[in-house]
Amino acid sequence: MIQSVKVKNLSLSKDNVRKSNRDLDIESFAATIAAHGLLQNLVVTPLKKNGHFTVKAGGRRLRALQHLIATGVLPADHEVPALVLADDADSTEASLAENFGRLPMNPADEATAFNHFIDKGASAEDVAKRFGVTTRFVEQRVRLAELAPCIFQALAAGEISLGVAQAYAVTGDTDRQARVFEQMKSAYYGNQPDNIRRAILNGTVKANDAKARFVGRDAYLAAGGRIEGDLFATEGDENWIDVELLEDMAAQKLEAAAAELAESQGLAFVTPVAATHVPYDTERQLHEYHATARPLSEAEQERVDALAVENDTLVDQLETELVDGTDAADAANARLEEIERELDELDAARKVVDPEVRAQLGTFVYIGGDGTVRVHTRMFSEKPVVDPNAPVVISPIGGADDVGEQGVKLSATLVDELATQRRQILVAHLASDPALALDLTIFLMAQDVVFANNYVRSHSTLKASPSQFPIFASRDEGSLASQTIADQRQALDTSWAGHDTMSARFDAFRALDDEARGNWVAFVIAQTLEPTLNAGDGGRLNGFHDHLGRILDIQVEQWWRPTAANFFGRVKKDVMLDALEDIGGPILRGRYKDAKKGDLASTCASLCNGQGIVEAEIREKATAWLPDAMRFDAIEKPERYPTRSAFLEAEDDEDVEAVDDALDGEDVEPVGEITDDDDLSEAA
């Protein structure tokens, strides 16, 4: 019931949910009421004293009215409309409902209020429906109410931000919260959520960690492992606390898988590696073995040809006659899968390793990113393999100094002259056979990859050496791209590499099918690309690499996401605010313009990785956002070709630097022109 009540007969109820910011900007609020009147009534309940009431909702309005009376703007007996409620429980809910939609409440007040209803038996879903928020939002606020008292009080007093409080709430262990809070209060970066989470979760792993997936949630819990949920991260995100137990369980399970594989395959060893990749240095300690492939028998070749014809026929029918989803189309697809399996089996039969050789070999098992056991596709030995079926090597006549035909010794000068003439003859013929030259190109580059740790003299200047990372010793095995490259390397056909001589290896390489040779050339050429970036003044900028990226239709956002560690925490605040504006416009930027840099970095990282409670449109833009430097959209600059004479004629270091800039594509005046044959030869 609405009735008029004198302001002097009103007092603020202790049940009012707003405990913080009560007096914030009261003068301004009072001026608004004086100019426009009280636009919304108060919510009160009667006291025992007749005509007196306690204000359950509208505490700031009451204080503003009292301020106007005290300053003489309103008379002492001024009356205001009030909704009189008899039920205290209803009045508390009314107080929360009013405050929730007004000046943002302190999160501690929201947490206490939500917890009030939970304590009275309401579910999080019920509370969420009452106030138009998500269930998860209610659960997050209730989790804040369960913080260690010292942290909750700091949040209520405005001494720490909501992001900092959420960082402490990733664990329910209040003792641990309090200990870390005491440590971080005096730390230089103690107010950054990422640092707090690392301190709180030191020695924990996420539920999506490869080892956690490998061991399994049920097995971990059955062994006594403890799990805590992080309500402020993605849905279903959990922290597995007993890391030592998890490590032991993963090691035991992987060791069992290694022992089973070694026994079933007859291998000398299978080394378990409790990681998502086999370290390069571990491989280098062993000798890589390449199984040679025998030629197909006449019957096998006939079967391969027949399967190829059947495969082509089915593919043609699926493209022209059969309708997707019909029984006939399903049967055709099933048969294509059978054909592929049979072809794989025939190919595997060609690479069967002699049991005596296999007994000298081993490999690795490791944990894939999806939590499954992965078997290294390559084989290794602790010592050089002795193949009992290998042909006997007959030493050539004469010693190392005997060079020439039929044991005749030739002078060093004559050797050089004859070698030069023979080289010219070989080059003339190879240059007229493009197909053979292409095979040789791929083979020489592929051989460098396979025998990277051994010296194999090819007598060719052609190389495809892998590019070096600009940061010394940086390997980056954990990224999606690096794992994909490792998988591509393991999938390459190395059956040709097991032959004893370069000639035999070349013949075996040429016998590979077009797809296998194509995979090799793609892999080795890709390894030569140097690190570039769509940013800077030319040192890392390369428009041609961007052109390649556009040709390949690379969607960078599917391979790399910005985090606080790899981007946002290492740029200026304006860069982060610009990112928020790109994602959600000026409103989103304004929401965080006063945030501290550490909190802002965490917020940007969460948004760009699909976390946080935001509108669907903003989430979609955030998960696709990239810094311009990571995009493949730079335009290639016109090239300049300084002549060699430009360097020779440079009078001082500044001139030389100008020439270098021109070669790097800098915007400087040309330092030379090619005008005649002499200049052309110098430029070459």
Image: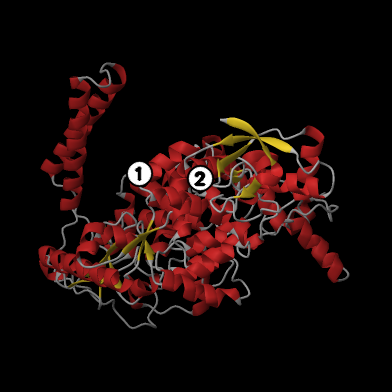
Which disc number belongs to residue 92?
2
| Image quadrant occupied by the N terminus | top right
Q: Is residue 105 visible?
A: yes
- Depth check: give the residue in front, 415 or 600: 600
Name the residue nearer the viewer: 100 or 185.
100
Q: Residue furthest right?
A: 651
Q: Where is residue 676 drawn, in percent x and y? A: 81, 50
Q: Quadrant of the C terminus?
A: bottom right
Residue at 58% across, 34% down = 83
Label 2 vs label 1, nearer the camera: 2
Q: Is residue 564 visible?
A: no
Which residue is tagged 1?
A: 515
10 Å crowding of disc 2: few (<14), some (14-19), many (20+) = many
Q: Is residue 315 left or right of residue 469?
A: left
Badge 1 element: helix
In the current view of this chain or complex, which residue is farthest to the top?
321
Residue count near mark 1 (Cα–Cα under 10 Å), binned few <14, some 14–19, many ≥20: few
